[in-house]
Amino acid sequence: MFCKELEEIVPSLGNHRNLKSVDVSYCSKLRMFPTIVRMEQLESLDVSECHKSLVFPEIQANMKCLLKLDVRDIYTEVKFDGLKRLEKFVCSKRHGKTLFPLPLTCSLKKLDLCNCFFKDGEILSDIGELSNLQDLDLSNNNFSKLHFSLSQLTRLKLLSLSYYKRLVKLPELPSSIAIITADGCDKLTSIGNLSENCNWLCYISLNQSTVIDGNKLLQSMLKGNAIENQSIHLRVKGLEIPKQFTNRLYAGDKCRLPLPENWCNDFCGFLICVVVEDHHALWISPDITIEEEASDDMRGMFHDVVWGEVLVVNLHGPDDSSGAVCRLPGPWMVLPTKKNQLEGDPRPEPRDPSSDGQVRIV
């Protein structure tokens, strides 16, 4: 909503029976919210990032239709026993107060406890029993490990554990997991069972970690189910560059890749590696554009084989404040990948480009 001058809401708001959505987020001067009496049809309520002294009524059972609730950085009591349909819950306890009692509701699909600063033993063990949970964000907390299992969350697809300064090992995860972010986890060294049981992984970001089995994780992703119908993305420190890339280094932001005739008959995707210096690891997120060109003039450019098509790959870093395109600080490579290459080890003789290096696979 971003209404910086709003200080109070008229009391009659709490009596609107047919209102479905209320959003007063980022109203930094809001100090009073009306008592919710008859908002039985309300589906979405966002009171996040308001004034730290905001007086907010208890969220009770008369909000039986509520699906989404965001109470980041405010203090209120949430009684989940009446919120039988709640699917998304977002909170934090920046001001050092516990925001909600137990138990959580089993209907939850997304749970965001980022910036709650939980310590060992404080995290809610009930999370391991939320059978419908698909998206879990536990970023920026202070415990070294989870004291409960996530392996029973058979619908969990997205997990964020970023900025756990004490986290040393990823927890055991269900086979359904597809996306994991654990950036800024300086002490993280082990990926647990990721490379063994999780066959749907399509996005993993482990910036600033020191995992020792990154190459094993790459091989697991290349042989997994996700690569059959979508791209995969891996960001991890110290990953070795596949041998096939060693003669295909590019220093600019564009390259042309020749493709053989009928290439799409035995084609799985394009494997792209970007080497990033350590101090760029968190902000570098290059945009990759791929265009197909078919021209007779292109055929004469390559002498070994008669090529039918040429692929143009553009790679740019993020825009800076002046609007100019930032160049990537390291070399990058692109390679077409055939289906049968994924059945074996596509890196028979890898090499380590740099002890500081990082490779991103897209």
Image (cartoon, helix red, strand yellow):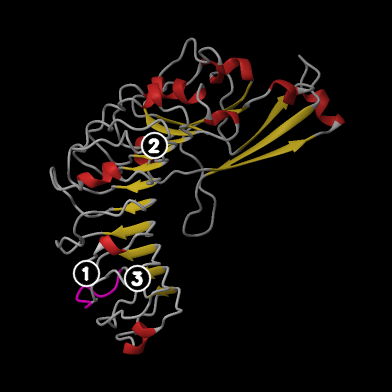
Residue 241, given in percent of the width and then of the height, sits at: 47, 21
Magenta stretch encompasses residue 51:
yes
What numbered label is drawn on residue 154?
Answer: 2
What numbered label is drawn on residue 17?
Answer: none
Labels 3 & 1 near each other (Cβ < 8 A):
no
Q: Secondary structure at mark 2?
A: loop
Left or right of residue 119: residue 312:
right
Q: Amino acid at mark 3?
A: Met
Q: Secondary structure at mark 1?
A: loop
299 or 67: which is nearer to us? 67
Q: Amino acid at mark 1?
A: Thr
Residue 10 seen anywhere in this rendered image of the structure: no
Question: Which secondary structure dominates the residues rendered in magenta?
Answer: loop
Q: Secondary structure at mark 3?
A: loop
Q: Amino acid at mark 2?
A: Thr
The residue sitting at 78% across, 16% down in the picture is 305
Residue 254 seen anywhere in this rendered image of the structure: yes
Q: Which residues are magenta?
A: 49-55
Q: First in sequence: mark 3 or mark 2? A: 3
Q: Which residue is mark 1?
A: 76
121 or 6: which is nearer to us? 121
